[in-house]
Amino acid sequence: MLFTRLAVPLRSLQKLTKAHRWHHTSLTNELIENMDKKATWDRFYTENGSKGQFKNFEWFFGFHSVKDFILPVLQTMSHSHSGPLNILDMGCGTSALGPCIHRTSPCAVKVTCADISPVAVKLMQKHTDSTSVQPCNPSSALAFLELDCTQLRGYFGARSLDLILDKGTTDALVRSKEGQVKAGEIVRQCLQVLKPSGSLLQFSDEDPDARLVWLEREVRRAEPAADVGVQEVGELRGVSYFCYQISPRTSEKVSKSLYKNIEH
């Protein structure tokens, strides 16, 4: 049976060592221990890109599992916005999340899919160039960017982004040997490049009892101050997933109906 997309929960990586998806056990072990390293991801996407026909690789789940979270947020943002919404898919890998938002959003969006691995970026750019896709809104745009997400402030201006999406990037960092410090720095940089009305959405399989404590600790050190909220996305293959929303405290809460706000 052929799948166009693979979806893998991070907590299942060790179980997948023996599965047919990865024939190189050393790669899987390296991935688990060094998910904060560029070389690890270059090797990972080189291995996956060498298997012939391109396939989007999805951590956790694909776009259709979260479109009902993302598209209403964009629609609400667009009501008080002139021009395309600026969206960053942070640590995109070869996920179809960003391209699907570009293709299906009724409101105009400028989607930037950024990853630390130039291998992943080139694979996505090549696949997009070879596929003729017309976005739902003719003013929408899609771009791919090689970027270390600990360097967001060096590329994006202050208060320049409307929405930042993180599907598994923070999870990869906090579970690696040296990545937790980087993950906290990324959250703080996200808050600096988000517009006052913007939000960072983290999709994760980490339980709120752990993730909320960590997020609240990190945003206390952030400028501007921020609010944190969470809602369960649902269960897939026996794993529960959550959406964490981190927003500058001055922002209008564009998704009040979706999130329980956690006050600090």
Image (tube, grey):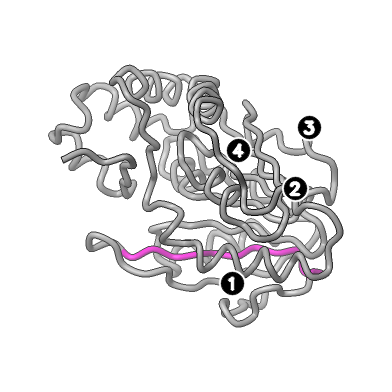
- Could you give the CA–CA distance between mark 3 and mark 1, rounded to whole angstroms? 27 Å
Front-most of 29 and 100? 100
Q: CB atoms at circles 1 and 2 under 8 Å apart?
A: no
On the question of residue 129 being in view, the answer is yes
Q: Is residue 157 above or below residue 253?
A: above
Q: CA distance from mark 3 to mark 4?
A: 16 Å
What amino acid type should be assigned to the residue bearing mark 4?
Cys
Of the residues shown, which amino acid type is indicated by label 2?
Ser
In the rendered image, residue 176, in percent from the top left (x then y), is placed at 42, 38
Q: Considering the numbered disc 4 on the image, is that residue within a helix, a strand or a loop?
A: strand
Q: Amino acid at mark 1?
A: Gly
Indicate which disc, 4 or 1, sits on the residue closer to the N terminus.
4
Q: Which numbered disc covers residue 20?
A: none
* Mark 3 in CB contact with mark 4 (< 8 angstroms): no
**Which residue position is annotated with label 1?**
229
Q: Label 2 vs label 3: CA separation?
A: 27 Å
Q: Residue, x 27% and y 29% (percent of image)? A: 28
Q: Residue at x 44, y 26 (%)?
A: 41
Residue drawn at point x = 48 percent, y = 41 percent: 173
Q: Is residue 185 visible?
A: no
- What mark, if any, has residue 113 been given in the picture? 4
At horizontal 79% and vertical 70% (from top left) the residue drawn is 79
> Mark 3: which amino acid?
Gly
The magenta span reads: 240-251
- Is residue 246 magenta-colored? yes
The label number, if any, that marks residue 154 in the structure image: 3
